[in-house]
Amino acid sequence: MSPILLFGFVFGYFALLLGVAYYTSKNSDNASFFIGNRNSHWLLVAFGMVGTSLSGVTFVSVPGTVGSIGFGYYQVVIGYFIGYIVVAYVLLPLYYKMNLTSIYRYLDERFGPRAYKTGALFFLVSRTLGATARMYLVINILQIFILKSMGIPFGVTAAIILLLILLYTFEGGVKTIVYTDTLQTTFMLLGLVVSIFAILSSLNITTNEAWQTLASKGLTKIYNGDAYSASFFWKQVLGGAFITITMTGMDQEMMQKNISVRTLGGSQKNMVTLATILLIVNGLFLFLGGLLFLFAESNGLNLKGDDLFPTIALGGTLSVSVAIIFIIGLISALFPSADGALTAMTSSFCIDILGMEKNTAQSEAQKKATRLKVHLTFAFIFLLCILMFKWIDDKSIIDVILKLAGYTYGPLLGLFSFGILTHRLVNDRWVLLVCLLSPLVILGIDFINNPEWFGSKLGFAQDTITSLSHLSQRLFSGFKIGIEILILNGILTFIGLWFISKPRESSAHA
């Protein structure tokens, strides 16, 4: 299919987003940018957050996992559902009770200013790495199948897309994103459904026949009962639950949209609705992955991982309409995660690091000028990180994202858990050290436990990987740490905070 034609649809899609942004950003101010004036409708937020929660990684990487682990990823999805319920009925009531604009203000009131800034700092690092990894995946597909043939370098592609995101988030912020995310989620789900029916038609089979064929090949298997495996059922479920609790409930980007809803009840309805929809949508993405596997097998295509869906959709084996739907669905999956991250990081830096919310010396106009400068700065940082992921050039970006989340969100899990579950007073000046040491210790343990993963990513020689694997076998007897790395990191942070804390009662006699 002509790259110029595909590019035309991409351009038209951006024009639509800019039109929505222009309409929704009229008369916007800092309150509009940060929390949408607390006037967002819960149903719009819930539907739009489907796109934010899924992103281009789900659109491309999740279908690509079916050929290797079947429907095993659904174990994590079950955990996600549990996590959303915890967020709805444990964390959201806390945030609404304190009337927070930034959720990290909780850490300030519970522990002190250094803990507060530590939480915000880990969010900024976590969201930067996670959002840019997701962006890299989609931008790289656009580069390979459209822009490379037009002679446009990868760096220019990334810069142009970031510029376009800036254009429609620059003024309206959350107020705009609530509407653009709803639009983009619609296109993404349309792309999913159309792709499923197109491949069923191409294979000339019914949904039931496809399911039976996948089951006969063992690809519909969800449960993994091997406790030593990195994908053991309870590891995956608990890991998925805590990923949601941290990456949604302790993440300013995700909570920024939720607390833009006027009431706690509306925000909780949003969260439960989102959790239910994601159970269904992730199941459809896995079914799509199974169909793609069958299609590749029947056409003699040796494809796997992140290459599976884009190559089939854009490689000319399906119709032109499917290629167009795929591209629109793909960029619709990209932007809800990218625009929200950029906006939330600007909000967090302005409120948590610069203290803009408490600064009465600056006028509204001065605060807006500062906010716009911060927004531009984070866009440039995003560009640098995307170029870094291009240099790494990983073939299954979902593994990288989950691994990074375990290290960067672990300290946030420890901080919030310690604050909610105990009444102890911490020595605020030591909080940052604890939160830095915990992931470093876990990194060392994980490196020894999973030398194959680290060796492949860092380019170790095979002899070195083999030697480290023997050491891992002796130390861990074949047990593999997986997605629960986040929980271990949080526990270690919790223990560290305990050692730098004292009972609240003792302070009364000091």
Image (tube, rainbow, N blue to C red):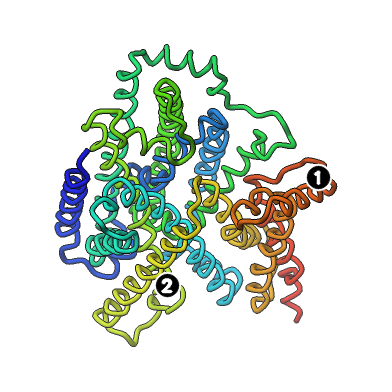
Please state if 431 lies on the left or on the right of 357 as rendered. Answer: right
Q: Nearer the viewer, mark 1 or mark 2?
A: 1
The x, y position of residue 150, in whole percent, is: 23, 53
**Residue 461 versus residue 158: which sits nearer the camera?**
461
Question: Residue drawn 45% across and 55% down?
Answer: 133
Question: Residue drawn 29% across and 24% down?
Answer: 198
Q: Is any part of residue 37 visible from this angle? A: no
Q: Pointer 2: what residue? A: 349
Look at the numbered disc 2 and give the secondary structure of its residue: helix
Q: Name the residue type under label 2.
A: Phe
The label shown at residue 210 is none
Q: Pointer 1: what residue? A: 473
**Residue 1 versus residue 79: which sits nearer the camera?**
1
The x, y position of residue 369, in whole percent, is: 27, 79
Question: Eyeballing the image, is 8 above or below 381?
Answer: above
Question: Within 10 angstroms of label 2, few (less than 14), some, or many (20 or more) residues?
Answer: many
Question: Residue drawn 18% across and 47% down?
Answer: 4
**Residue 319 versus residue 480: which sits nearer the camera?**
319
Quadrant housing residue 464: bottom right
The x, y position of residue 161, in whole percent, is: 28, 59
Quadrant housing residue 192: top left
Please state if 427 lies on the left or on the right of 124 as rendered. Answer: right
Q: Name the residue type under label 1.
A: Gln
Question: Within 10 angstroms of label 1, few (less than 14), some, or many (20 or more) residues?
Answer: some
Q: Is any part of residue 75 visible from this angle? A: yes
